[in-house]
C-alpha cells in the first residue's frame, strides 16, 4: 500500500499534473516487436507485429517530465526505456530510446512516430525527426 502511494505521488510530478496519453507509433519490418523497461528490472513485451506496425500506449506527465505506462491494474509505472526491433534478435539489433529522449519527444503533445530501418531508428513528431 505504501509503495502504491509512493508511486502515485512520484508519478503525479511536482505540479500534480495528470499524465496524458503520449502513444508511440512504430513502423518497421514485419516481425517488429517492442519492450518497455520499467524500474530497472521489469519488462513489458509487446507481441510481434505481422505488418511491422505497433502502437505503444505511453503516457507523459508534463509537470514531472515523466514517461509512464499503465499497468493492468491501472497504476502508472515509470518508463526507463523503449526497445524495438526484430523479434528474433531484439536485444542484439533492436533500437533503444531512453526515457529522456521519450520525454523530449512527448513534450510537444504531438503524436510520436518511430521508423526502424535496419540499424537506424528515426523518431519524431509530425515530419520532423528528433536525434538521440
Image (cartoon, rainbow, N blue to C red):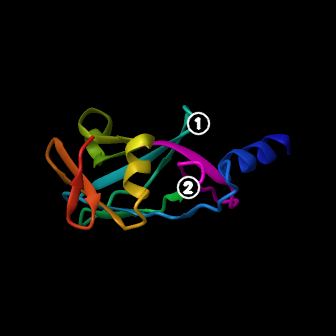
Quadrant (top left/top right/bottom left/bottom right) for the C terminus: top left
Quadrant (top left/top right/bottom left/bottom right) for the N terminus: top right
Q: Nearer the viewer, residue 132 or 33?
A: 132
- In the rendered image, residue 78 lying in the magenta stretch gets the answer yes
Q: Nearer the viewer, residue 61 or 28?
A: 61
Tell me: 69 left or right of 83: right
- In the rendered image, residue 11 lying in the magenta stretch gets the answer no
Q: Which residues are magenta?
A: 63-81
- Residue under the image location 21 percent in, 55 percent down: 129
Residue bearing the label numbered 1:
39
Residue 122 percent coordinates (x, y): 21, 51
Tell me: 57 left or right of 111: right
- Residue under the image location 56 percent in, 32 percent down: 41
In this view, the residue farthest toward the right is 1
Residue bearing the label numbered 2:
69
Crowd class of label 1 (few under 14; some 14 to 19; many from 20; radius 10 Å): few
- Residue under the image location 65 percent in, 49 percent down: 13
Residue 21 percent coordinates (x, y): 51, 66
Q: Which mark is residue 67?
A: none
- The answer for how far apart the CA atoms under marks 2 and 1 are is 12 Å
Mark 2 and mark 1 residues within 8 Å of each other at the beta carbon? no
Crowd class of label 2 (few under 14; some 14 to 19; many from 20; radius 10 Å): many
Number of numbered labels in the structure image: 2
Label 2 vs 1, first from the N-terminus:
1
Please tell me whether residue 1 is drawn above or below residue 128 in the rendered image.
Answer: above
Residue 36 percent coordinates (x, y): 46, 47
Residue 47 percent coordinates (x, y): 40, 57
Please tell me whether residue 53 is drawn above or below residue 36 in the rendered image.
Answer: below
In this view, the residue farthest toward the front is 15
Q: Nearer the viewer, residue 84 or 110?
A: 110
Tell me: 22 left or right of 131: right
Amino acid at each position: 500500500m505504501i509503495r502504491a502511494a509512493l508511486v502515485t505521488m512520484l508519478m503525479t510530478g511536482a505540479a500534480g499534473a495528470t499524465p496524458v496519453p503520449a502513444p508511440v507509433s512504430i513502423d518497421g519490418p514485419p516481425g517488429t516487436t517492442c519492450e518497455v523497461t520499467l524500474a530497472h528490472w521489469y519488462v513489458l513485451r509487446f507481441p510481434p507485429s505481422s505488418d511491422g506496425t505497433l502502437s505503444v500506449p505511453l503516457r507523459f506527465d508534463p509537470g514531472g517530465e515523466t514517461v509512464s505506462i499503465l499497468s493492468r491494474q491501472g497504476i502508472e509505472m515509470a518508463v526507463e526505456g523503449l526497445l524495438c526491433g526484430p523479434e528474433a534478435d531484439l536485444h542484439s539489433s533492436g533500437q533503444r530510446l531512453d526515457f529522456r529522449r521519450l520525454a523530449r519527444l512527448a513534450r510537444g503533445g504531438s503524436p510520436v512516430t518511430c521508423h526502424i530501418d535496419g540499424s537506424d531508428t528515426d523518431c519524431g513528431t509530425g515530419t520532423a525527426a528528433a536525434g538521440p
